[in-house]
Image (spheres, helix red, strand yellow):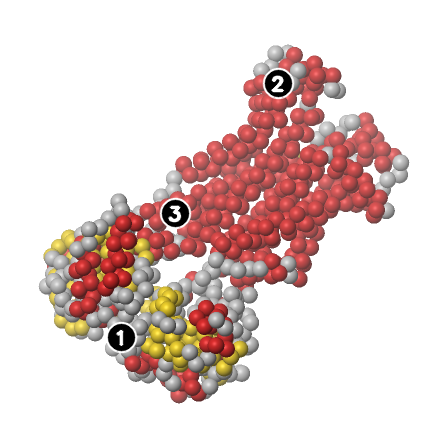
Amino acid sequence: MIKNYFKIAWRTLQKNKVYGFINVTGLMLSLTAAILIFTFIKFHLSFDNFHEDSDKIHRIVTKQKRESISYQASVPPGLSEVVRTDYDFEDAIARTVNFSDVQVTYNDNKKVLEENGVLYTESDFFEIFDFPFIEGSLTKEFLEPNKAFLTKRMAEKYFGNASSAIGQSLTLDNTDLVTIIGVLEDLPQNSFEEVEIFVSYPTLIKDNIWLVSAETWGGITSDLQCYIKLKDGVNPEQVEKAMAPFPAKYRPNSSNTHTYYLQPLSDIHFNPNYHGAMPVKTLWTLAIIGVFLLISACLNFINLATAQVLNRLKEVGVRKSLGGKKAQLFWQFLTETSLIALVSVVLAVGLAILCLPYLNHLFETEIGVSEMLSTKMFLFALTMFIISAFASGAYPGLLLARFSPVMALKGKLSSLNFGGVNLRKTLIVTQFVISQVLIIGMLVIIKQMNFSQNTDLGFDKEAQLMIPVAAGSDAADKRAFKERLQRLTNVDNASICFTAPASNMSWGTSVQMNQKDEQEAFRVSVRAGDESYLETFGLELVAGRNIRKSDTLNELMVNETFIKKMNYASAEEALNQYASLADSDNIPIVGVFKDFHVGSTYDEISAVAIGSVSDVLRQYAVKINSQNISGSMKEIEGLWNEAQPETVFSYEFVDETIKEFYVSEQRLLTLLEIFTGISIFISSLGLFGLVSFMVERKTKEIGVRKVLGSSISSILWLFSKEFSWLIGIAFLLSVPLAWWLTNQWLSDFVFQAEFGIGLFLSALLFSILISGVSVSYKVIKAAVANPVDSLKSE
């Protein structure tokens, strides 16, 4: 019986090739998207689950509260030592400090700049996390300064193989000479840790005692993080309760309220508050889009199948007259849909494998084909096959099975209704609701991304180059190189600074005005820079003057938001006031400048202070000739190689850094554009197939109308008018849903683009255009045909 079902199903599909092609194509595309989305989500959900007792591992993080709440994935350096010595919560606790863009010198003075940098870590780090050794081991030797571990990949990169690395030395930023005492297996790509050079923590003592001292509680830096592995029976709430008194005890004079929490290891990759690489919201968005695409393809299937039912009524009538049972007819039709679903799944898996490299390139991952073709993927594909086969075939099969054979043979069944509403119309409306929601979502993200990347940030970001200061440079060295930069033909200006006005780097601190007894309730973002900082970045003074040339913090400029938060009546009122911040007291405010964004459009504009703090002037900001970028770069690189021959030349453009603020959104937009295109294509295929069936059934009517003088446009309108008002209904239904969804996404942005009715009308016009193209081809082809042939065909 089953063999007979498949034989008949195959013959039916061969007879109706267009029907089969449309359904296979639609299902194949939606299933390909679903498989890729499933692979992507499965990969990200696997992050850091390879560590033994991963449920006991946490990162200690900080919630800061002043006039607003902020989150830091770090703690004061002294916290770990207090937890380690005063309590008995942990099996292990370890601090790490990550310095990125570190120059590594190896083998006969070969140099390379490692973007991920170096991780200075306490030895307990390797007791907490499962990063196995292939050469050497964790010994007390790692408690000494200037010892290091490498991953296998880095050992091979520097020394040819893992065993050759043991005993070799590396020089970091021309200052620290470290000896390799162990080689680790390469880090799994689903690990939160990306750094591949691990240096013993005591190495920091020489130059960064602030990061090492147990007495350091006066601030936190994003470079430092602290991990803890709890003992059996200890829960995070116990540790958090024990840490609750720490701020009052160790930071009694701070108005910045700290609360310390334990963040589970499983949350690190996803939590946006602590800069998680993949927000859960993005995964949910992709999952919902995958479901939408699958629904759209299944609706196509049902729509075309119910349209075909009218062409198969006589077949059904004959079968029933000859004793065919309802169940047999139902399973016959379900076999047809199962065959289509099976072919679609097989093709979708193959297409997904072909598309996997593109997904890896887009998200900078290395998901292998073997990971895609896993047991979970097989179960997922099987589930998709069952869902698509039954969802698409069950209702049309029931329709076929329930018809009266007498009515079917007499041809008195002409339309299908479900609950009093035409089923096909409902399905078309649903499809276009899905398509229009995706189109509107895509347009909103495009507009917001354009706004975020092109809005006036309050400073000149074009042709601005940031060059790290060479390690070991003192104040005189920095100033001398800056002056040489300013003399170059293609350099308009240069400054020595901490970072650009908008940057991933941040330095927030408390401020206390001298006429007050307490610190202010707000934090100040410090943008340390010399007297050329304002001019280099085109910052505009609104009151007072620029700071004078100095290597110490003896004058300050503040922004307009600082003035507002201080409740000064005017910018002039702030001039000659004295402030204490950044471990410096009695610093006069000499100027006020216009507000600028210090981060992305996600964030409010904060209070900013600019002054010359030589210890943190780590970069040169260089405004170059925008008409001759390549010439400027060659000129600057030549000067660098002449002045700093021991340091690899590296740089970053400010506008490219700003784009990195929105990498996650840009990737989501790219996927949304692809999936929206697939949704539109599936809907268009369905409309084309449906119109094809309608034209086939109305061939004689078209011929009669032509003979009676109907024009091509009137015949086209005959078929188009029904779809036009269906698209209108879909638009009215999709607008509130799309508005709600896009508002949820936009809620994270403090600064948003303006969205008017025009954006929604654009989605409507686009849908009308697509449907018009889908409908027009087949109808016009029938309308221009010789009416004699049309009438003869029946």
What amino acid does circle 1 point to? Ser
Q: Is residue 356 above or below residue 517?
A: above
Q: Residues within 10 Å of mark 3 (few under 14, many from 20)?
A: many
In the rendering, which numbered label is found on residue 784? 2
Label 2, label 1: how many angstroms apart (C-alpha)? 83 Å
Label 1, label 3: how many angstroms apart (C-alpha)? 38 Å
Q: In this view, does 67 lie to the left or right of 293?
A: left
Q: Where is residue 783 in the image (x, y as percent from the top left)?
A: 62, 19
Residue picked out by circle 3: 448
Residue picked out by circle 1: 254
Q: Is residue 509 above or below residue 87?
A: above
Query: Residue 750 occupies which quadrant of the picture?
Result: bottom left
Q: Is residue 521 left or right of residue 727?
A: left
Instruction: For residue 200, say whether it is visible.
Output: no
Disc on the earlier residue, 2 or 1: 1
Q: In this view, does 504 lie above or below 25?
A: below
Instruction: For residue 134, say whether it is visible.
Output: yes
